[in-house]
Amino acid sequence: MSRRKRTPTRPAEAEKPQPAGPVSAASADATAAPGSAGSPASDGVPLRRRWIWLGALAAIFAVVSTWGQFDFGQMMGYYDLFLDGVDAGHLYLTMTPDQVNLVDMVPYQGKWHFNWGPFPALFHWLPRLAGLRLSDRVAALLAGLASCGVFLAILSELRRRFFPQMPERFVGWFLFAFALGTPLALTVFRGTIYNENIGVGVACVLAGFWAWLKDSERPSLGWAALCGLAVGLALLTRITLCLYGVVFFAGIAATDLAGRSRPEWSRLLGRLTVYSLPILLCGFLQMGFNDARFDAPFDFGNRYKPEHTPGYPLMSAARIPESLGHYFLAPIHFPGDFPYMEHTGLGEAVRVRRAEAASSLLLASPWLVLIVCAWPALRPGGAAQPALRTVARVVAGAGLLTTLAMVMFGAVSRRYAQDFMPAWMLLAFVGAGLCAGVTKSWGRWAPAAWAVLAASFLLHVQIAFYQSFTTPTPDLNVVRAFVAMAPTLEKVAPGPKLREEAAIAANDLGTVLLQQRRFAEAVGAFEQAAAWQPDSDRIRQNLEMARRLAGGR
């Protein structure tokens, strides 16, 4: 008697396990695509690969941010000055401009006050418990690396959920484009207090994006609270970033209402409350910080700064056209002499105070054109699945709000663009995922894409390097590197401006070496300066003094 092989029956469709959460149900088609079960795509990007990429970025950051000198010392040290005051029992600085170079501080009632958000001070305070001091240069590097890590986690999550066919190598290229080809590079390569502040704020915002993205797939009170905490800490770092809180609030509501015929109001209100509480708490902390310093909870001290102009509002819609021109249309000028490229904005600054390092972001980061490909995920009735539409609209809303705030602001600076650049980069990634020509033909496009990225990287390196000559504070690492490379530059691209700047840099380096009692090296630096500017009486006097000191040792 033969035994028939028993064929297992498939469970009924209704008995299949359903995804948890309303939006994840809408994205089930994407996660069920090839590669979603048991393949590398199911995990987005393997953790080992992520660490390799981040390790490579850490090495690049360490080399470029110190300009090959590997001196990670303080640039400004303002967070430590602030903490010195806190240790003394007050919120004003213990130093004055007569004792140390103070830039962009707030004088109030005879005291000098810190001008930046207080949250990053926590990262400087923790090492002090062990007797160590974290320099602003290292803090800016770590903030940039943290931003890259969270940005990569977001890309991995988007790939897993919506674009499982996207090549892993494209994700890696896009990460490096974000790290080396956007204003993030400036905040890392020039580790001043203001760049550190921007970097920490962006890391917090990206953490909020990641938490919201996780919540959009599996809604929970924990993810909502984490998203709110990230926004709150961003607010405590850089007040303009509070606008992200509005967009995430709408995103959480959209996530909860998606796919429901009748809203569960108690559930929705509970999640929004849990999200909002950390933001409100951080807002009250900021108000208390303001009140303790300037006797008013909503006073950030801007009107007490020496450069404040009465009747000149911090925000104005009248600045929008000019600021848009500086950020997106301004050309790069090539003077033929040092610094070889100039970024001076679109004409003279009229309604804004300045256009600092301003040239078209579209020229510097041309991959932003991929945003156009995200249109199917934005338009009503588009072909994109509902979950992806929600993500794209939240990202686009964040980009629009923060861009609007920056183009209304009283000054234009490329580093300010980092407030809105993460949102536009994420939308460009969505556009790339929807563009079959990118995902299916990446092997053909990759060499050209890496070449464009290399050009963008060099552009941002040049901007960061030259800012040491034009904005506070001069970077001694830049001075050393420039003095070392100036003879080569003089052979390749000579010019009077190069000789003038090289002489100033060599003279500055010699002065520092004198202060360090390295007299023989100081003589060499002053001799270089004298060779470039033989008619300078000051350089000649410094050289004679250094020779006397070196001979008297």
Image (cartoon, rainbow, N blue to C red):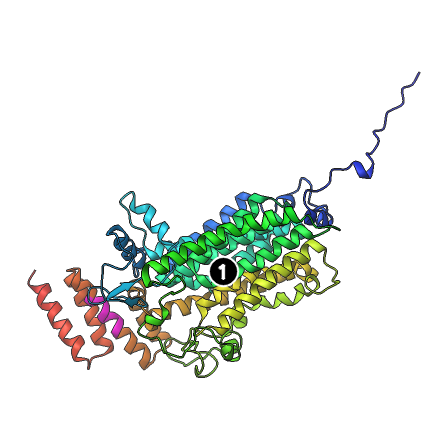
Q: Residue furthest right?
A: 1
Taking the spot 56% from the left edge, 58% from the top edge, the residue there is: 174
Residue 147 visible: no
> What percent of the width, then of the height, locates residue 17?
74, 37
Report the front residue among 142 and 83: 83
> Is 310 above or below relative to 149?
below
Taking the spot 80% from the left edge, 38% from the top edge, the residue there is: 14
Secondary structure at numbered mark 1:
helix
Question: Which image quadrant: the N terminus?
Answer: top right
- Main SS of the magenta part reads helix
Question: Which image quadrant: the C terminus?
Answer: bottom left
Query: Is 510 a magenta residue?
Result: yes
Q: Residue furthest top?
A: 1
> Is 19 above or below relative to 499?
above
> What percent of the width, then of the height, locates residue 552?
6, 63
Report the front residue among 36 and 389: 389
- Dot 1: within a 10 Å radius of its alpha carbon, few (fewer than 14), some, or many (20 or more) residues? many
Left or right for 16, reference 91: right
> What percent of the width, then of the height, locates residue 100?
23, 64
Report the front residue among 484 and 289: 289
Taking the spot 32% from the left edge, 51% from the top edge, the residue there is: 134
Residue 180 visible: yes
- Quarter residue 428 falls in: bottom right
> Is 86 above or below relative to 183?
above
User: Count of labels shown?
Assistant: 1
Query: Is 336 a magenta residue?
Result: no
Magenta segment boundaries in residue numbering: 504-511
> What percent of the width, then of the height, locates residue 133?
29, 50
Kind of residue at badge 1: Cys
Left or right for 521, reference 152: left
Residue that label 1 marks: 242
- Quarter residue 540 falls in: bottom left
